[in-house]
Image (tube, rainbow, N blue to C red):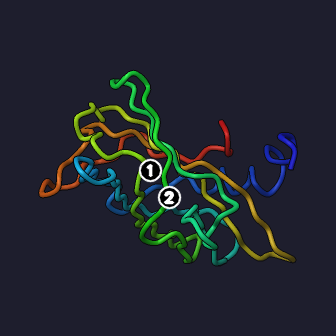
Amino acid sequence: MSEEEAQTGDCARVLQAFDTFDGLRDYGTRYGAATNMNTGFHITMQATCWPKAQTFTIRGYAGGSMGHWIPRPTVVLPKAGGKKFTGRISVGGRAIWGARQGVPVGWNIQWTDSAGSIQLDWTGATVTVPLEFGWKDNGDHVCTFDFKFEMWKGATGLLASNARMLNPRLVLHGQ
């Protein structure tokens, strides 16, 4: 799909419609000493103005046969020299619900080769999770977006409570 198609067609309509982020809107970043760092997050993506009562399927990269065509999630740590990790969704990877009611997404991302990264400063890290949105309306429709948010607290620790996401948003993939 060209940039022009993405900005004027179905994908642009979906991007504009899914403008409400409700639910917990939180994340927890744990482990990272002897094992890989994990980030779990919970959010409900809602399109209250969507013209039809339709079900949307949201998928992310989970490795293997689960969303293997979708790009991997990434996290960039600006206070650690821009260190970057890629990952995969290790719990979940697919969410289905009505657009108007909101699609609840509660997933865990395991960051590849991040053992020992608990020593790094995760404050202000930007998480990018490529997501494939699919729905049926006179045929199958699929668009890829990036769900992004910032970690205001950084690593939350194993027993700590989750922290609030900063600036949760959907953008066209790659922007």
Can you say whether 3 is above or below 94 in the image?
above
- Give the secondary structure at mark 1: loop
Residue in the image at 61% along x and 58% along y: 131
The percent position of residue 8, horizontal first and vertical second, equals 83, 46
Residue in the image at 36% along x and 40% along y: 166
User: Residue tagged by mark 2?
Assistant: 88
Observer able to see residue 57: no
Image quadrant in which you'd find residue 126: top left
- Give the secondary structure at mark 2: strand
Residue 39 appears left or right of 60: left
Residue 58 appears left or right of 168: right
Query: For the C terminus, which image quadrant?
Result: top right
The percent position of residue 88, horizontal first and vertical second, equals 50, 58
Can you say whether 84 is above or below 94 in the image?
above
Amino acid type of the residue tagged 2 in the rendering? Arg
Query: Extreme left residue here?
Result: 159
The percent position of residue 68, horizontal first and vertical second, equals 65, 64
The residue lying toward the viewer, choosing from 160 and 20, is 160
The percent position of residue 15, horizontal first and vertical second, equals 66, 51
Image quadrant in which you'd find residue 42: bottom left
Q: CA distance from mark 2 to mark 1?
A: 8 Å
Circles 2 and 1 in contact, beta carbons < 8 Å: yes
Can you say whether 77 is above or below 18 in the image?
above
Observer able to see residue 140: yes
Image quadrant in which you'd find residue 91: bottom left
Characterize the local packing of mark 1: few (<14), some (14-19) or many (20 or more) Cα atoms within 10 angstroms: some
User: Residue tagged by mark 1?
Assistant: 112
Residue in the image at 12% along x and 57% along y: 159
